[in-house]
Image (cartoon, grey):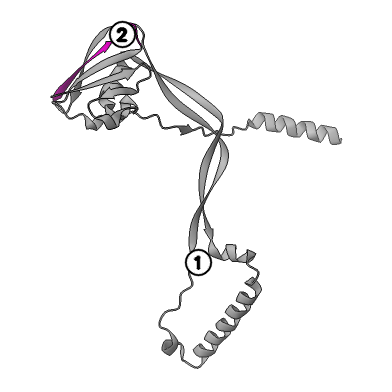
Amino acid sequence: DISCYLIDNNGFIIIAEDSSLTGVFFGEAEGAVMNKLISMGSFTRVNMYDYQATCRVYSEISDTAHMLLHPFFAVITSVRKLLAEFVILLIEFNLYSWWCSDLTAEAHRGVRSMLVPCDMEYPAFVSERTIKETVGNIECEGCVRSFVIQQIPSSNLFMVVIDNECDCSEFGPVTLDPIEIMYILYYNKQMLLLLDSKVQTSWT
């Protein structure tokens, strides 16, 4: 039992036995084989950067805060105060247990999102042009999975034939998911002291 793929020099599937894989990155369909091709140098990872990207940020916003913008907020607040005084009155007359066994106030929270500027890193892969025919083996849980990759002459396409006798799902897929770049602000203590001394000197 074998699987055959026709991929381009960036690792995207052009033709596959499963038509739903057409256009999918090869690493997502065959993560173990793609990892092996990268370790063998057949494919090289290239990082691309987008400094004008947008990221979605999620936050919980209380409905009570939203009511501050409601035109009838003052009326609602007054009604709540009256109800609170009425409950206190019931408690004083020992009617609380008769009125309700459990009074709870819970702020209903909703999740809202917004887009903010951010920097993103996008992984990409480029094939080695000198690939003619390469054979590889992958050890998967005591089993050896073999594959062959061969370049199609006068093109940027490669034929990949994989032996399916072994289950190599333990390796996981190789994806092209973008990664948000997180910057860590580093303050040099000596520089801060130097700036502070300059400020004090300017005032003397």
Q: Is residue 183 above or below residue 93?
A: above
**Along the line of sight, which residue is nearer the eye, 137 or 30?**
30
Residue 161: quadrant of the picture = top left
Specify whether residue 172 is in view. Answer: no
Q: Position of residue 125 (x, y in %)?
A: 39, 20
- For the magenta stretch, what is the residue range? 143-155
Three-letter amino acid code of the residue under disc 2? Ile
Three-letter amino acid code of the residue under disc 1? Ala
Q: Is residue 111 above or below residue 130?
A: below
Label number found at residue 1 = none
Residue at x-position 74% and y-position 34%: 196
Q: Position of residue 34 (x, y in %)?
A: 30, 22
Disc 1 target residue: 107
Q: Is residue 84 above or below residue 46?
A: below
Secondary element at tag 1: loop
How crowded is the residue under tag 1: few (<14 C-alpha within 10 Å), some, or many (20+)?
Answer: few
Residue at x-position 40% and y-position 83%: 101
Specify the quadrant that holds the N terminus.
top left
Label number found at residue 131 = 2
Describe residue 10's horizontal placement relative to residue 16 as left or right: right
Specify the quadrant that holds the C terminus.
top right
Residue at x-position 49% and y-position 23%: 48
Specify whether residue 81 is in view. Answer: yes
How crowded is the residue under tag 2: few (<14 C-alpha within 10 Å), some, or many (20+)?
Answer: some
**Along the line of sight, which residue is nearer the eye, 7 or 142?**
7
Q: Position of residue 136 (x, y in %)?
A: 22, 15
